[in-house]
Image (cartoon, coloured by chain):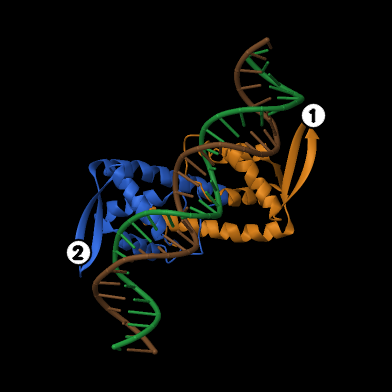
Chain colours: A orange, B blue, C brown, D green
Amino acid sequence: MGNSKLYKGSLNTIILKLLEEQGKMYGYEITQKVKELTKGELNITEGALYPALHKLEAEGLLDVEVAKVDNRLRKYYKLTEQGEKETVNRLAELEEFIRSMQNLVNPDWSIN
Amino acid sequence: MGNSKLYKGSLNTIILKLLEEQGKMYGYEITQKVKELTKGELNITEGALYPALHKLEAEGLLDVEVAKVDNRLRKYYKLTEQGEKETVNRLAELEEFIRSMQNLVNPDWSIN
DNA sequence: TCTTATACATAAGAAAATTATGTATATTTG
DNA sequence: CAAATATACATAATTTTCTTATGTATAAGA
């Protein structure tokens, strides 16, 4: 919520990465997984997540499959073939970005 | 220019960090330094930089000092006392953020 | 029963960038 | 020497991306 306003720009890549790892996930599951993986650091809001998922779908990177579990709706997303290719690219970009940021903020660490 | 659109949100912290390191810098110098440190990865545009500097100054984190070198104008910025304190906080936040991103993208690396 | 959790969605507004201009001087290159 | 590039600032219009605020609906727990 109020904490880190820093992950701007990388939400799409985070989604793609998780789907690559997990095969398929639904929206709510993604928010919980990110919270878990970052120990509460990153809280993806619904207002950011759902439009992002819709956009990735519209771009042809994700496929949807609707399911009903316990009488509740779930929309499972998974990578398309194109999505898998894009994920590789975007992950490389993001890793390069992280490395650059590290270099700026703390040049001592990374030898690269 | 066209490359990385990923550093969103961390520009202010980058500026503060550089000023902490270098003592004082002028705008153009900052863009060049960042380009150099990131081997061309991050290109801070003027449209992003100058408004950011003005805002940091308005917030009381930066002081300005105008100079004329080779008949050309330069505005040297440096941290105020308050700016120095804030820099510590924001750097800690940014490092935590970088660590979180690393954990998401490449859990293998970091043990943390 | 009321609150919290699960599960989706969208609209209004804010924040932070990009892109496109504009001004002006200095230096380099053809 | 003229033209292009580099240095140095600035701002306006637009776009992207997020937060905040709502809204609907079911399930589970206190």
Taking B101 as reference, is B95 left or right?
left
Subunit ID for the residue under disc 2: B
Residue identified by numbered label 2: B68
| Residue in the picture at 27% in, 44% down | B84
Q: Identity of the amino acid at label 1?
A: Asn
| Residue in the picture at 33% in, 60% down | B30
Place of residue B31 in the rendered image (x, y in percent of width and height, measured from the top left): 36, 62
Q: Nearer the viewer, residue A83 or B5?
A: B5
Q: Does residue B8 lie above or below B92 as drawn?
A: below
| Residue in the picture at 39% in, 60% down | B46
**Same-subunit check for callouts 1 and 2:** no
**In terms of image quadrants, where is residue B36?**
bottom left
Place of residue A50 in the rendered image (x, y in percent of width and height, measured from the top left): 65, 42
Q: Is residue A3 visible?
A: yes
Taking B81 as reference, is A91 left or right?
right
Helix, strand or loop at label 1? It is loop
Q: Residues within 10 Å of mark 2 (few under 14, many from 20)?
A: few
Residue identified by numbered label 1: A71
Subunit ID for the residue under disc 1: A
**Mark number for residue A91?**
none
Q: Does residue B49 lie above or below B71 as drawn?
A: above
Helix, strand or loop at label 2? It is strand
